[in-house]
Image (cartoon, rainbow, N blue to C red):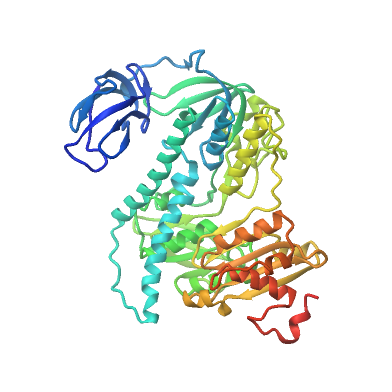
Amino acid sequence: MSIEIKLDSVGGKEDASYEIIEIYVKEGDYIRVNDVLMVVEGDKATIEITSEYEGVIKQLSIALGQIISEGESYIHIEPVSNVVSDEPRMLDEKTSKYDLAVIGAGPGGYTAAFRAADLGMKVALIERYSSLGGVCLNVGCIPSKSLLHIAKIINEAEEVHQFGVEFSKPQLNIEKIRKWKDRTLSELTDGVTELARLRKVDVFHGTAEFLNSKQLLITEHGSPHQESTLDFEHAIIAAGSRANKISHLPDDPRIIDSANALSLEHIPDRLLIIGAGIIGLEMAAVYDALGSKVTVAAKYDQLIPECDGDIVKPLYDRIAERYNVYLETMVSKVVADDAELTVHFEGNSEVPTVQAFDSILVSIGRHPNGHVLSADLAGVYVDEAGYIPVDSYQRTNVNNIFAIGDIAGKPMLAHKAIHEGKVAAEVIAGLHSRFDATVVPSVAYTDPEVSWIGLTEKQARSRGVKYGIGVFPWSASGRALSLGRGEGKTKILFDLVTDQILGAGIVGAHAGDLIAEIGLAIENNIKAHAISSTIHPHPTLSETVAFATEVFESTITDLYLGTSLALNR
């Protein structure tokens, strides 16, 4: 049975009429949710009308130049659940062959697809989520940052009383918060969908498996699932990763991962977060602000073990005042009953051996999806962990198949995947491109933020690197103090022979924004004096980068270092 679709109010206007200036579909077309059906023009705006359904167009009651009003019927769609198709469905000769098939539409995947399309290739983009953007846009980077922004506002409103400003306790409407977060995601995912349409990239929502080195089996979402084969000259695997699990924990809906946590289905009174990496600590900040009594348990002796201890210490000091942080602690057992989850801890004698919680968030890293693609049928080597090794051109052991992002190796970061995606697309197009980045920055969007790039001091010591160091405490930064956040610091490591920057760590407000300057310096072999002699605006947090360099050079005037001035020389 077909569904009659009527024009809703457009652009916030009711009882308005519009002229149809473009029609993108015809009767018999198969359409998906968010596909553009037509473009209408009103008094002051041109607006795209998109589909809310997936299915086949049975009747089209519109024409170019027609005037259409709110409430007027313009299309009949046979929903996907009623569509009958042959299985497996072979795409016709005209549409089955692609220059490039990209598996995964996260930031790396859609970047690769769009760059390839811009270079003249016919591109297919396959995404397992119902909207483009992958884990990052749908259940990762973007929703977490939206919620962290709310957490920051809540915390600042609470803490500003020390400056003489008093706010009442905030009233939280979780449903509205969830809708705001989802609206932010929709704006971004809709934007990516539109970019795909403008570039004429064919999008398939479903899963992909290799049949051989030139064909994929696509299983598209819908009821029933539709299978089709897709021929390609080249493929880019951008299938990402998934959250690690703890095998000895019970199968209980109250034990969740970060994707579940970001849905905000429930705000538990008592939340245990297992893992003190970036994702776990960001979720701790969100749920603490939303009212949960948070406990973080981690097996390592510091937060974010990849980073230097002195850089994460200001973060530890701040959050330890707000919630429990159990370091060097393992969860040995969890007993689930109707009332609560009883957790048994071991490893740290100062931590309670047994404690009850209402929910547990497991955040102990991620593992790549290399083993779910039948890559072996294409001859692609996948290691035991699920990674697909690549060369500097992002090429796998099979010449026409490339891999990028999480599945191609650590660090598992969207900005690395984006860079790799462009490289892969350009290499396939015959351009001289390669992944030659010296460093990749990392950021924890906690409060305070933590960022680092290049060599850490721990790594430099373990490798026997002779390095100098410049550290500037934010307690001497006018901008940091004016924000009431003088706990931060900027630390930069330098080569003692060349004065070039080896790495850096920053903790404090907007640390993630500040680290980019260091990355630029490392990639371009910039020496210390080039940083310190560049005039940084005052008062800003960016000054702390120049000041840390001046500490290394022993030219700092905003600190008095006394007899230690010559330590680096």
Q: Residue at x 50, y 78 (%)?
A: 481
> In the image as oriented, which residue stretches furthest toward the right?
497
Q: Is residue 537 left or right of residue 503?
A: left
> In the image as oriented, which residue stretches furthest toward the top?
93
Q: Position of residue 98 (x, y in %)?
A: 56, 22
Can the viewer see residue 357 in this picture?
no
Q: Quadrant of residue 359?
A: bottom left
Q: Position of residue 84 (x, y in %)?
A: 35, 17
Q: Residue at x 69, y 43 (%)?
A: 435
Q: Is residue 297 left or right of residue 187?
A: right
Q: Position of residue 24 (x, y in %)?
A: 36, 24
> In the image as oriented, which residue stretches furthest toward the bottom?
562
Q: Which residue is more in the foreground, 289 or 561? A: 561
Q: Residue at x 38, y 76 (%)?
A: 160
Q: Is residue 10 left or right of residue 321?
A: left
Q: Quadrant of the N terminus?
A: top left
Q: Residue at x 47, y 29 (%)?
A: 203
Q: Quadrant of the C terminus?
A: bottom right
Q: How many marks?
A: 0
Q: Position of residue 139 (x, y in %)?
A: 45, 47
Give above or below for 365 relative to 272: above
Q: Is residue 550 left or right of residue 354?
A: right
Q: Quadrant of residue 32?
A: top left
Q: Which residue is more in the foreground, 383 or 410? A: 410
Can the viewer see residue 147 in this picture?
yes
